[in-house]
């Protein structure tokens, strides 16, 4: 075997998961950020976790109001999913700029993209510093799904967004 670094490993484990982290902004709109580093943690109780760079605007939002929806985006918005990972919501409404149609979900005032396969509505339980990221550990409040939406993945590390079939 060859010795490699962790970024190279993340390319070799492609496809990796991809989610759009939806957090509420003070103006009532939703900020959308592309995040690959998320995982299920526990089914009983239902818990998930994700890691975001300390500088991310999404992190600031969830540390402030504790509410977040992780969404698995559908194939129709694959270009926009890449776009949500290339800019910060600090000074931009990404949904508007990238033309992402939004919908409401029951029990939450956080809007999410219409083209969503799975939406996991969470409350932040705790967060921890992990190197250059914070790890956000969340209790899951509700989960919604639309099985007609085809899930997207991150390919070649984080260089390309495509469905499992498109990526082959
Ligand atoms: C495919 C892809 C995957 C990404 N995964 C992560 C991730 O897991 N964690 C992270 O902090 N940033 C990740 N990013 C970068 C963030 O999406 C990016 O820093 C974004 O600008 C953060 O937006 P915000 O400042 O509005 O929160 C990823 C970007 C792309 C394109």
Image (tube, rainbow, N blue to C red):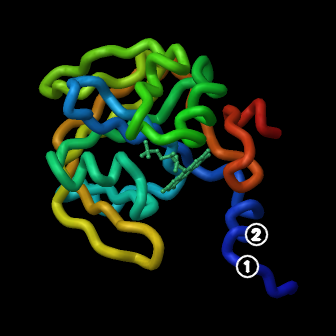
- Residue in the picture at 65% in, 26% down: 79
**On screen, residue 11 above or below 27:** below
Q: Residues within 10 Å of mark 2 (few under 14, many from 20)?
A: few
147 w.r.t. 68: above or below: above
Q: Residues within 10 Å of mark 1 (few under 14, many from 20)?
A: few
Residue 83 image position (x, y, % from top left): 60, 32
Disc 1 under 8 Å from ligand 1? The reply is: no
Quadrant holding the N terminus? bottom right
**Picture coordinates of residue 75 (x, y %)?**
61, 23
Q: Tell me: 43 left or right of 166.
A: left
Q: Is residue 65 left or right of residue 102?
A: left
Q: Are marks 2 and 1 in contact (CB under 8 Å)?
A: yes
Find the residue positioned furthest to the right. 2
Residue at numbered disc 2: 8
State the image coordinates of residue 51 (x, y, percent, origin top left).
Answer: 42, 61
Q: Residue at x 54, y 25 (%)?
A: 74
Residue 61 vertical placement versus 127 (above, below):
above
Quadrant location of the C terminus in the rendered image:
top right
Q: Where on the picture, by quarter, is residue 110? A: top left
Q: Which residue is mark 1?
A: 5
Q: CA distance from mark 2 to mark 1?
A: 5 Å
Most extreme residue toward the front, as rendered?
A: 91
Q: Does 89 sit above or below residue 28?
A: below
Q: Is residue 107 left or right of residue 47?
A: left
Q: How many marks?
A: 2
Q: For the residue labelled by badge 1, is the local secondary structure a helix, a strand or a loop?
A: loop
State the mark number for residue 32.
none
Name the secondary structure under disc 2: helix
């Amino acid at each position: 075997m060859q010795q490699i670094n962790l970024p190279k490993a993340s390319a070799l484990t492609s496809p990796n998961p991809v989610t759009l982290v939806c957090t509420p902004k003070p103006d009532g709109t939703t900020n959308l950020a592309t995040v690959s580093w998320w995982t299920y943690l526990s089914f009983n109780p239902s818990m998930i976790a994700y890691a975001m760079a300390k500088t991310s605007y999404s992190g600031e939002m969830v540390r402030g109001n504790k509410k977040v929806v992780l969404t698995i985006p559908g194939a129709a918005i694959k270009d926009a999913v890449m776009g949500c990972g290339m800019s910060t919501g600090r000074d931009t409404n990404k949904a508007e700029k990238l033309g992402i149609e939004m919908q409401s979900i029951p029990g939450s005032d956080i809007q999410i993209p219409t083209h969503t396969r799975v939406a996991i509505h969470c409350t932040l339980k705790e967060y921890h510093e992990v190197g250059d990221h914070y790890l956000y550990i969340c209790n899951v409040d509700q989960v919604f799904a639309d099985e007609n939406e085809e899930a997207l993945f991150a390919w070649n590390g984080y260089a390309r967004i495509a469905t499992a079939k498109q990526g082959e």
